[in-house]
Amino acid sequence: MSDPSAYTRRQFIRSGLALVSTVSSVPAFLSQSSQVMADTSGPLPSNPGVPEDRVLVVVQLSGGNDGLNTVVPYGFSDYYRGRPGLNVREADALALDTDAGIGLHPSLAPLHEMIGEGLASVVQGVGYPNPIRSHFASMDVWHTGTTLASKGHGWVGKAMDSLRDSADTSLACVSLGSEAPLATQGKHVKPVTFDRPELFRWSGRDLHPAISETYDRLHDQPARVDTSDPAGFILRTAMDAQVASDRVRKAVAQAPSTTFPRIGLARQLQMVASMIRAELPTRVYYVAMGGFDTHANQAGQHARLLDEFARSMSAFYSELKATGHQGRVVTVAFSEFGRRVRQNASGGTDHGTAGPMFLFGEKVHAGLLGKHPSLTKLDDGDLIHNVDFRSVYASVLDRWMKIDSTAALGQRFKHANVLSIGG
């Protein structure tokens, strides 16, 4: 039997790294200088000019959402000619602009209600120049905010990097999923990423009772450490990791004030709502749902996906309202591209280009925004975008988050008129 006293401080430090293995990314650990020590016990330190109580939620709709059957141009005859067996009837569409003949897919009824309440908007025809029809390449463009071939770092990560010298960014971004998306990866700031909150913890506790006891003593009465020493740095970051994991797991353990549907995206947003309610010092939350690559038998599958998206967003904002946090949160939802105008021979649609984005929150310009792409003036059978997605990012960063968008996007983009706030 091992002697418990044999577990030295150095062995404990080595075992403390076990927390890192439980998640794909840990907040700023080992990627920042040992002079930048995290403190996740409270809100971000005051950063002049930055409204740190404001939260951005990003929803990724992976696979290439069919924008034409999401935002339905029921007043356009070319829509029905291109999709004789895969269209939404005018009688079924939820009207947004009766003069232009544009509405929503009937599965988006909860979202349609949110628009009526002033809480949601649809931005039509969003894309970028010289579009790419590859899932991975196009997603990289949306994640990095650049059309350059080099991946670089993500737009959210670069935005968080810009705050690094004036704020604690150790818990600034939280991503829910099995791995951290490129969008959240900065050069210096990395997101906290987890799929199940019970796995976001220090796994060294499972190795030996003596290790657990040593850890608890160090955690309860932390010794002064020389952070210029690698061992001291690792010890301190291990402590900070445990604080972050404790706060996250405690937050998501709270029962919601409202009822969430038992579906994938809603489960993620329920955890996000709990962390917002707990007032974690997190600026950006990132969630995703997949399944939008509808090459065959699209009708039923797409209807179910849109139903999940709409019901999840409605439940999320109902919870935020019930807990008094609705005014703090703006949500942006995107997909890497739309689908082609004409249906294919398999009852589905193939990879296209421009599609809609969605924004949610009290400070969005509610309703239908922008101009629907032409169904006759096409680029090799594809829609031509009217709005560069980076103009939406720029507006959200500059006007909502009060973070200079050039740091995230590498250049200045004219703001899309999507928010009803000054700046």
Image (tube, rainbow, N blue to C red):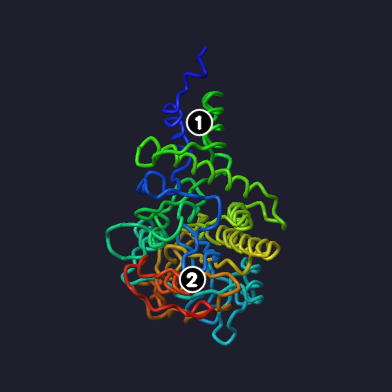
As helix, strand or loop, the secondary structure at mark 1 comes to: helix
As drawn, the residue found furthest toward the front would be: 224
Question: Crowding near pointer 1: few (<14 within 10 Å), some, many (20+)?
Answer: some
Separation of disc 1 and disc 2 at Cα?
46 Å
245, 315: nearer the viewer: 245
Q: How many marks?
A: 2
Q: Position of residue 387 (x, y in %)?
A: 41, 76
Relative to 289, is 363 above or below?
below
Judged left or right of residue 241, residue 391 is: left
Q: Quadrant of residue 245?
A: top right
**Mark closer to the chain start, 1 or 2:** 1
Work out whether 44 lies above or below 366. above
Q: Disc 1 vs disc 2: Cβ atoms closer than 8 Å?
A: no
Specify the label residue 423 is tagged with: none
Q: Is residue 2 above or below residue 30?
A: above
- The residue type indicated by label 2 comes to Pro
Give how far across and how far down residue 39 sits, in percent.
49, 50
Question: What residue type is disc 1 on?
Answer: Gly
Task: Say which residue appears at 54% left-offset and 23% top-offset.
Answer: 210
Residue 14 in the image, given as x and y percentages of width and height: 42, 30
Extreme residue in the top direction: 1
Q: Residue at x 62, y 49 (%)?
A: 252
Can you identify the residue that label 1 sits on? 204
Q: Camera-side residue: 267 or 102?
A: 267
**Along the viewing direction, whichever of 199 and 19 lies nearer the viewer:** 19
**Which quadrant holds residue 407?**
bottom left
Q: Dot 2: what SS?
A: strand
Closer to viewer: mark 1 or mark 2: 1
- Residue 142 in picture, x, y percent from top left: 39, 63
Residue behind mark 2? 356
Judge from the rendering whether residue 371 lies leftward or rightward of residue 137; answer left or right.
right
Give the crowd class for mark 2: few <14, some 14-19, many >=20 residues within 10 Å: many
